[in-house]
Image: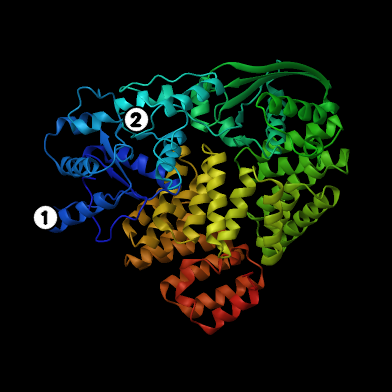
Amino acid sequence: MEGESPKAASAPTGAVFLSYASQDAEAAKRISDALRVAGIEVWFDQSELRGGDAWDRAIRKQIHDCALFVPVISAHSDARHEGYFRREWRLAVERAGDMSERVAFLVPVVIDDTSDSRADVPDRFREVQWTRLPGGDTPPVFVDRIKRLLSPELSPLSAVSGAAPGIGERVPPSRLWNPFLLAIAAVLILAAPAYFWISKHWTPSAVAFAPPPHSIAVLPFVNMSGDKEQEYFSDGLTEELLNSLAEINELQVAARTSAFSFKGTNTDIGTIARKLNVGAVLEGSVRRSGNTVRITTQLINAVTGYHLWSHTYDRDVGDVLKLEAEIADSVASALKVSLLGDVATKIELGGTHNPAAFDAYLRGRKAFTSGSTDEDTLQRAIAAYTEAIRLDPNYALAFAGRSRALSVYAGGAGIPNWTAVRELFNKAQSDARQAIELAPELAEGHLALAFLLAFGSLDFTGASEAYERAMTLAPGNAEVLAEGGRFAVIIGRFDAGLTATRRAVVLDPLNPRSHDMLGEALYWARRYEDAAAALAQAISLESDVQRAYGYRGLAYYGLGDLQSARSSCEAKADHWASQWCLAVAYEKLGRHADAQAELTKMQAAMGDTAPYQYATIYAQWGNAARALESLATAVQVRDPGVAYVKADPLLDPLRKEQRFQAIERELRFPD
């Protein structure tokens, strides 16, 4: 932990102490961020370290109280024969000497090609297994194993799947001859077509991969039609199949964005599985000719590399719904999942047997999920969904899709006035209700309605019910969990909301939006440090996630780190979220003219459609009268931002004002 200043408070039970040479701070931060996003407490702070008795006492207490000690080993640590991190290592070894050999405490990680046999480390480090995290890149499997080691319900042995010792676990010679453990090993060998090589120089790539049971990723099917314009069809069919598998509650299915991030790459199946933390991968190809389609699929055990099942289907496009159900049933059987209820009916729910309508729906979804929110893209999506509805007026999924596209369009900064915004929200709500009327069990319909009730009608009780219904119907849908979780947080249900948003990250680990949504939820829950880490992870996955820079800046602002807030928001200074952040950060820094300039930019771009944001800025500037006036206007025009009134820390200066309290009562947030 060199380069850090210990705090007076001790690390809480279950904390991870990260010890590193100062030259490895960047890699150590990557490890810390990955663990924190998963809800793990990490003792990691990059403030300046000062020695002395106070430092020594604080460090000793931290190392005494932490649950796991993670030394970061590298060429940098090897080159330095003296440094504070070596004192930390010595203290950790002394504590480990007082522990049972069965207790996992030391978890060494290597961030480069430093050899464990030649590294300049305490001998005690060599008695446990090392994990290689090149450059500090931290895969989900490592995070999961740390969580297992921290779990009070798990012993050091049960924290690790398989017969091999776990991360940080000692391997005393007597264990190899324990009859009880040999019996367990025999059962495990019979239960899985894999073997484990136990050695002091074990590497995680050979043994550590232990994905959740019945977990699967569906990779983008290859378009074999010979026409690049048919790409939307092969991608859409893959998404439909992915959603079909997600309807099986017993399966954990990696979400679309994470799975599709490997499209067009030559990444091997084993690497993909580790990045997504899944035990099986489904891949295939699509060849379309008119209304006839040939789909070839194969299911691979990502742990062993063996093929579990493969099949080729020739179907009419109008029979795609039945085909999805058939493939889902075959996959479930291959993974030995017991299907509960009528899965085929759930898969076909809200769909269509009209080939042209299905084709139009896929084009609409391709545009909507492209990641672009510009007017042309959204209009293309709305037009395609509208065509699908014209071709099949009972196509519930198309109504839900158009509702979502209209909502995003209405929420954009390009809508000139509240009358236009309200018309779009009304159309979107009508579509959402039509989707539910056609298919009452369709989660997408309830999700679309929930968003509109929350941010369009400001009916927070109705929105809460709709979000809960959507999450009940689609517990494996990352988008439903992320949005439902965020809403739960902003109405004050922090624990349930953060559990849902964290689950969304597990299902969609490579999607920057899932980390962005988690970061936003953590910000509203006032867990600013964790919020900044989650938002940094979103940015690391995609540097152009502009919103994340603004919310990360607000998280730093909440921590009182005004320079970091300024730096984060200035990185994307043209985005409204960054301007919002800079308007308050500059004011606190005494740069009043610059703060006013940021507010002026927002007003020029957004006009009278952002009274809520203006209210928060005035509140932070200490102008309560202007803030309350803007907030009253926001409520009157039903500004979507009003949904954040209960949780927003920027409004704290107003909370004792009678007018504010009256507004909060008027909004009738559920308990």
| Residue 644 percent location from the top left of the image | 56, 65
Residue bearing mark 2: 131
Classify the position of the C terminus by image quarter: bottom right
The amino acid type found where label 1 is placed reads Gly
Q: Is residue 99 visible?
A: yes
Residue bearing mark 1: 52
Q: CA distance from mark 1 to mark 2?
A: 33 Å
Q: Nearer the viewer, residue 350 or 380?
A: 350
| Residue 618 percent location from the top left of the image | 47, 72
Circle nearer the N terminus (1, 2)? 1
Q: Nearer the viewer, residue 64 or 112?
A: 64
* In the displayed structure image, the side of residue 78 where residue 646 appears, left or right: right
Question: Within 10 Å of the Cα at label 2, are there few (<14), some (14-19), or many (20+) other Cα atoms?
Answer: many
Q: Is residue 300 above or below residue 253?
A: above
Number of disc labels: 2
* In the displayed structure image, the side of residue 405 where residue 198 appears, left or right: left
Q: Nearer the viewer, residue 81 or 590?
A: 81
Classify the position of the N terminus by image quarter: top left
Q: Secondary structure at mark 2?
A: strand
Farthest residue to the bottom: give it. Answer: 658
Q: Is residue 569 visible?
A: no
Q: Is residue 122 above or below residue 642?
A: above
Residue at left offset 32%, top offset 67%: 590
Residue at left offset 58%, top offset 31%: 259
Residue at left offset 37%, top offset 21%: 198
| Residue 379 percent location from the top left of the image | 71, 44
Residue at left offset 82%, top offset 29%: 322
| Residue 42 percent location from the top left of the image | 35, 48
Farthest residue to the front: give it. Answer: 179
Q: Secondary structure at mark 1?
A: loop
The amino acid type found where label 2 is placed reads Thr
Question: Within 10 Å of the Cα at label 1, are there few (<14), some (14-19), or many (20+) other Cα atoms?
Answer: few
